[in-house]
Image (spheres, rainbow, N blue to C red):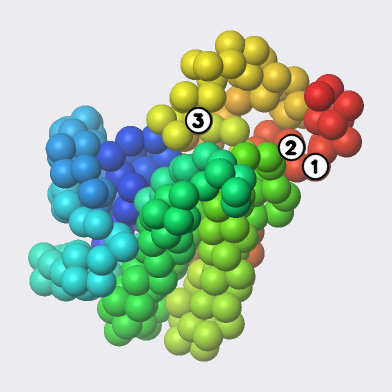
Amino acid sequence: MRLKGKVTIITGAAGGIGRATVLRFAQEGARVVAADIDQQGAEETARVVPSDYPGPVTAHAVDVSRADGVERLISDTVTRFGRLDVIFSNAAIMRAGSVVDLSESDWDALFAANVKGAFLCGKYGIPAIRRNGGGSFIITASVNSFYAESDIAGYCATKGAVMQLTRAMAIDHGPEGVRVNCICPGWIETAMSQPFLDENPEGREFAGKIAPLGRIGQPEDVADVAVFLASDESRFVTGSAYTVDGGWTAGMTKALALI
């Protein structure tokens, strides 16, 4: 019950890291709003939460790139529960391509979902959190916040941006009691990574080889870190980036040797 009574919003909750985090938060006693542009997926997430979990979960459809939708998400949550303690800005998309190959519309879509979405969740969510005397704001960044990979130029650019956004928000809102941190997953077995794994049968094995812990990550690996950052256990943690990659970034020399 590490999150008992905390009112939380998790975006990108229809699957993957978002769904796993909804389940963990509910298990730890949080009152959770599972938000996603995919309403059916968000509702399915709410349905799969075991009935014996102490935290209630409600679904909410939202396009995080639209200010009116995010503002409504925040206001509806506060109206329903009377407060807001935690936001996990997790919604993101992937578009492949170099800057030459990537279309302008895909570039705009990446920044709208991955960066503007976090900005809007902060713009409308932080005032609600600080009214309670503070809380936690978490963003899903990436190991690509630290290093780049080929053919995902736009994605790398957005994840570098959200890491800097995390730091800037931590400085601005720390005095108000709002802690802001980001989680930087490596290869995690989600719908976003699945196309690569399906097209490259050796990809899963390779990802396991270059990670010192010897396996590809699971959404639950990220969800457990999110629980820590949402809880009072991280009360003196802000402006930090938590890498959840099985040691991949620590062992980049090994990774390059295997390529």
Is residue 203 something one can see in this rendering? yes
Which of pointers 3 and 1 lies earlier in the amino acid sequence? 3
Is 24 left or right of 74, judged from the image as shown?
right
Q: Which image quarter: residue 86?
A: bottom left
Is 204 left or right of 17, judged from the image as shown?
right
**What residue sits 32% from the left and 53% below the top?**
11
Q: Is mark 2 on a helix, strand or loop?
A: loop
| Mark 3: few/some/many CA within 10 Å (<14, 14-19, 20+) | some
The label nearer to you, 3 versus 1, is 3
- Provide the residue designation for mark 1: 250
Which residue in the rendered view is the most extreme toward the bottom? 175
What is the x, y in percent for residue 115? Answer: 46, 63
- Provide the residue designation for mark 3: 193
Q: Which amino acid does label 1 sit on?
A: Ala
Q: What element carries label 1?
A: helix
- Provide the residue designation for mark 2: 247
What is the x, y in percent for residue 79? Answer: 11, 71
**What residue sits 60% from the left and 51% below the top?**
99
Which of pointers 2 and 3 lies earlier in the amino acid sequence? 3
Asked whether disc 1 touches disc 2, contact meaning CB atoms under 8 Å apart, the reply is yes
